[in-house]
Image: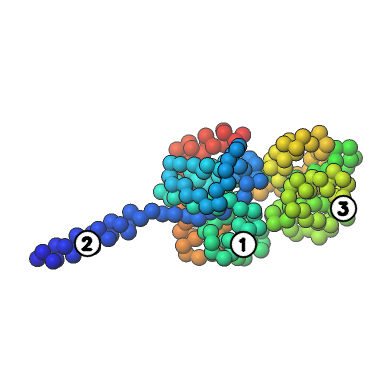
Amino acid sequence: MGRIFISIVMVMAMAQGAFGADKTVVLATLTDFAPYCFPKENAVFVPDEHIPPGSDSVQLQGYSWDVVRESFHAMGYTIRLLVVPWERGTHYLANGKVDFIFPANKTVEREREYAFSTEYVDQIETVVYMQKDVNFTWWGLESLEGLTIGYVRGWSYGKLWEGISWINKESTDSIAQGVEMLGKGRLAGLAGYKRPYDHVLKMAGLTHEFKIIGQFDTIDEYLMGRSNKQSRLMLNAFDAGKQKIRESAVLSRIEERWQ
């Protein structure tokens, strides 16, 4: 009888440990994407950061980060955060080093290979910049036919941009490099995400030198992960957490903070 009682207690303890085990999701994101994901002032870089529910990153801030963090924390997940350049993050995702990368918009190629959350992380406006003194009439992407337009390598500008072949697309390593090339006349225009690009121009004191000639898309961005059962379970958790923070007004406070 004593041995049976001890066995029962051990089974119950093991079950309690299993059900009470910490849930962890491993995320990758970038930091040059203000106001969505960008460094805190004077922050010390932490290559691998663990962030349990109720706490925040010591290095990262932004609208997208707040939405993702609060959504997973609402579902009891601890976040393991890797802050890396976008192309390295996608490499980590492909090789299973991280569960998800964000914020990612959907493209034909990505949807063939990866799974996405149902709830979006953020929404972006894609626009085209030109030099301030250029006289140009915008009537959509068709008006750029034959022109050389820059874009940041590794970033996606939506299915409309992907589907056109009449623009000479020239990749750059960063927003700053694209702005420099545009300023020197090496590009006729620069395709960009409005709020992050505006932030770079403002910080560099270059707002007065460039203008937006038109918007060509509005894109929802998501969590993107490998297409397997475990990923889909965690995507479902994120979707449920996003709904929770919407109902509890946490999402409203995030939106007010980053307006």
Real-space Cα separation, disc 2 to disc 1, in angstroms = 42 Å
- Residue 64 in view: no
Depth check, front residue: 84 or 242 = 84
* Residue position for label 2: 10
- Residue 28 in view: yes
Say whether residue 168 is left or right of residue 240. right
* Residue position for label 1: 91
Which secondary structure lies at badge 3?
loop
Real-space Cα separation, disc 3 to disc 1, in angstroms = 32 Å
Mark 2: give few (<14), some (14-19) or many (20+) Cα within 10 Å: few
Q: Determine the residue positioned at 53% across, 59% down.
A: 98
Q: Quadrant of the C terminus?
A: top right
- Proximity of marks 3 and 1: CB atoms separated by less than 8 Å: no
Please tell me whether mark 3 or mark 2 is closer to you in this view: 2
Q: Position of residue 236 (x, y in %)?
A: 47, 55
Q: Quadrant of the N terminus?
A: bottom left
Q: Amino acid at mark 2?
A: Met
Q: Earlier in the sequence, mark 2 or mark 1?
A: 2
Q: Earlier in the sequence, mark 3 or mark 1?
A: 1
Q: Position of residue 160 (x, y in %)?
A: 73, 55
Real-space Cα separation, disc 3 to disc 2, in angstroms = 71 Å
Q: Which mark is residue 147?
A: 3
Q: Amino acid at mark 3?
A: Leu
Which secondary structure lies at badge 2?
helix
The vertical placement of 53 against 5, above or below, is above
